[in-house]
Amino acid sequence: MPSFKRRIAVAAIAIAAASITPFAAIALPSTATGRISVGQVMEMLDKADTSPVARQTLVAYVAGVGEAAGVIADTIGNGGLVSCKSSFSLDTRAVRAALEAGAPRQGNWSQTPATPLIIADMVKRAGCRTRN
């Protein structure tokens, strides 16, 4: 017979899984190549105000994209290959605008990778240029 502590732990895990399952069950799929799609990011943007799971997922994704792009630009920039007029910036409004501009047809959102569109927008807004 399981101990009281073990039953509490199992119950806590079950509750946590049950609270996440509704969001995961209705989440849009990744692209056919497994990349995060515009549809997935737009869904997170739409649900972020009402779903803590969507908000946390969105924050982690946006932070990861922004930080990785910044590190790459800094690394390449230190070698003199890239120069930018301003720092990279990224927030939910910029993400939505980049995705809507880069993938205007909603019918393609499930197979359009989001990350390249967001990074291209950040690079453009920062005024980055490569050395020829």
Image: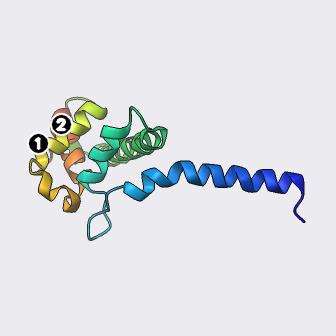
Give residue 43's position: percent from left, percent from top: 30, 46
Residue 77 against residue 5 in the figure, above or below: above
Q: Residue at x 26, y 65 (%)?
A: 31
- Determine which residue is flagged by label 2: 97
> Looking at the picture, which amino acid does disc 2 mark?
Ala
* Residue lying at the far front of the rendered structure: 1
Crowd around label 2: few <14 · some 14–19 · many ≥20 (10 Å)? few
- As displayed, is residue 32 above or below residue 127? below
The picture places residue 103, in percent across and down from the top left corner, at 12, 50
Residue 73 location in percent, x, y? 29, 45
Using residue 18 as the reference point, say whether residue 51 is left or right of it: left
Q: Amino acid at mark 1?
A: Ala
* Res. 123 image quadrant: top left
Q: Nearer the viewer, residue 14 or 88?
A: 14
Residue 48 in view, yes or no: yes
Give the labeled residue for mark 1: 101
Residue at the image position 48 percent from the left and 38 percent from the top: 52
Q: Is residue 83 visible?
A: no
